Image (tube, rainbow, N blue to C red):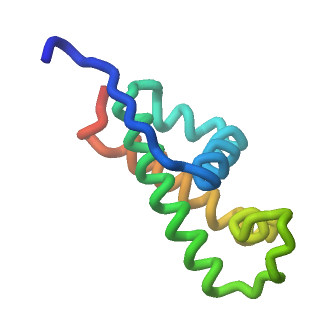
Amino acid sequence: MKGEEEVWLPLVDEPIGTIVAQLQAADPEIDRLVGSSPRRILAFRTFAYIRVGMTLGELYVESDLPPFDGSDTWAELLLKDPAHRVAVAAEVRKVAEEIAADPKFAD
């Protein structure tokens, strides 16, 4: 392979991808930590999606949600609780900090 080629893998990311994108947009420090290289962005998204999914799953098990009425998904309902939103945002931020600190992802 000559040089570095950009490789993007499609990730099935709904609704988690949207949640990560919203939290990333709300915290500009995340973009600074992750940087702009395709490798770092892919690593960030991959691990953020996994960790957000796990966090939401834990919150789902621990929470009493109203019966589904066809409007919001269970993930959206969970994120309406400010404490849950803070917990999920903290996971996204932790992933960005770990990517920034990992020498394997140095530019």
87 relative to 20, above or below: below
Residue 45 in the image: x percent, y percent? 47, 44
Q: Tell which of 106 and 23 is nearer to you.
A: 23
In the foreground, 100 or 54: 54
Residue 51 on image: x %, y % = 48, 62
Report the number of numbered marks.
0
Tell me the quarter of the image containing the C terminus.
top left
Q: Does 9 sit above or below residue 71?
A: above
Where residue 40 appears, x then y in whole percent?
A: 38, 35
Left of 51 or right of it: where is 22?
right
Query: Between residues 3 and 89, which one lies in front from this camera angle?
Result: 3
Residue under the point 59% across and 54% down: 16
Write the residue at 60% across / 70% down: 56
Q: Is residue 37 left or right of residue 54?
A: left
In screen coordinates, is 50 left or right of 17?
Answer: left
Height in image: 64 above or below 85? below
Q: Quadrant of the N terminus?
A: top left
Q: Which residue is most to the top?
A: 2
Viewer-proximal residue among 17 and 23: 17
> What residue is drawn where x is 69% and y is 63%?
86
For the point 78% across and 69% down, the residue is 77
Residue lying farthest to the left in this orientation: 1
Classify residue 105 as left or right of residue 23: left
x, y percentage for residue 14? 60, 51
